[in-house]
Image (cartoon, coloured by chain):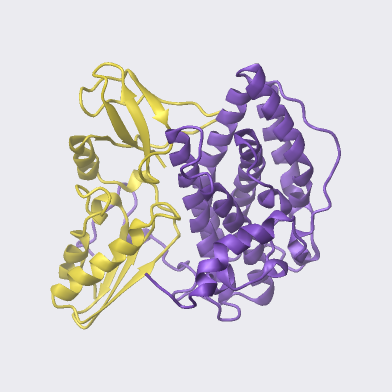
Amino acid sequence: MSELDPHGDVTVEQVRLSAELAGAEGRAASADVAEYALWLGDDALVLAQQLSAWIARAPELEEDVALANIALDLLGHARSLLRYAGTWDGRTEDDLAYWRDEPDFRSAWVFEQPNGDFAHTIARQLVASVYLYELYTALQASTDATLAAVAAKAVREVEYHRDHAVQWTLRLAGGTDESRERMVRAVGDVWPYADELFRDEPLIDRLPGVAVRPSSLRPDFDAVIGAVFAEAELEAPGEFVAAGGGRSGRHFPTLGYLLAEMQVLARQHPGATW
Amino acid sequence: MVSGGAWEVAAAVRDPEIPVLTIEDLGVLRDVRGDRDDVVVTITPTYSGCPAMDTIRDDIVLALTEAGYARVRVDLALAPAWTTDWITEKGKRALRDYGIAPPAARTARQGPIPVRLAVRCPRCGSLDTREIARFGSTSCKALYECRACLEPFDHFKAH
């Protein structure tokens, strides 16, 4: 095997190649695993589409590039997860993204919250990235090799997203009176939607060892948010909690508009490629 | 049997975004196996959404087909996840010569508040640099500026 050059301290002989990107030669997901992959994939897809709306509209060029990069990472996670979800019934990632209607989506409401002003986008990013970081950290230990592989890849990218959200939270909260007022308002508006992320739906009970139990992520989420809020001198909003229901196909009103825009081209020109 | 020839052909394919790096330097090429009739190449994405992977895949098929390999398949493996620690020393030198500050080894971090390490300017060697933006022209790069020579430059993020 002398032809194989070592890459740093890892050589290809030692590399495990079993967890291939799902959809190529990978295993097919069971119905329940596919549903779980759909939850996570839809969260990533909806957030990627939302953030993409900032392209060419962000407050400054660097931020335009940052939000586009974050959206691109999330789109990558969505593609891997939806491709895996589709192995259950033979649908492609494009079938799932473009040919499902609103009630068939499984995204949680926090990802569906409107972009609002920049502070609202940052508040939503803070909730989303801190949650996703804890989720993917835990999901790396999943007994499902494909989910574990997607998580191991995603966690390091989401770490950047979390840094980005934390830095902007500190900057806006500690900036001018105007930026602070907007950040406080944004946190208050977004916070009621965080709770849905930590609810243990019946599906979770059917996937022991495969899925991450949402309620188990809450303590670490609260600890990280608490540290950031302490540094930013922000107070955690009150106990008001939104209904949610995304995992059952009940969505916040923004999702329909988002899907209409995202899906229109694929539906007007079925099968078109470029 | 692994074909040394096939590995060399695939290893010479260059990153479309950073053409001074081969996919071997970048640590993206994982495995090449098969014979002249059938060859399977396994690559790993750098970042999940990196659009260069599609181009790299096409370039590998093209390079091996031109080299006389009949059937070429390129698989993507996600695990274990790529890290900048897999960029070869040769690759890091090529990056620096190209004007991109190469990644340092990944360091442990504490808590959610990020801590930054100084990045050396690839042009003048000064450590007096600052991050302009954590996200740059591609997923793998951040934008920096050197306070000594005043040049902006890309930094390949430790990942």
Chain B drawing hue: yellow
Instruction: Name the quarter where the N terminus of chain A is drawn.
Output: bottom left
Seen at 24% across and 60% down, the residue is A4
Tell whether A273 sits left or right of B63. Answer: right
Q: Is residue A23 above or below residue A236?
A: below
Farthest-out residue, right: A239
Chain A drawing hue: purple
Q: Is residue A67 above or below residue B72?
A: above
Q: Nearer the viewer, residue B2 or B92?
A: B92
Seen at 22% across and 53% down, the residue is B22
Tell whether A225 sits left or right of B53. Answer: right
Seen at 40% across and 27% down, the residue is B132
- Residue B97 at x, y = what percent? 17, 36
- Residue B131 at x, y = what percent? 40, 27
- Residue A195 at x, y = what percent? 78, 46
Quarter where residue A106 is shown: bottom right
Quarter where residue B55 is shown: bottom left
Instruction: Name the quarter where the C terminus of chain A is drawn.
Output: bottom left
Residue B68 visible at all? yes
Tell whether A238 sits left or right of A7. Answer: right
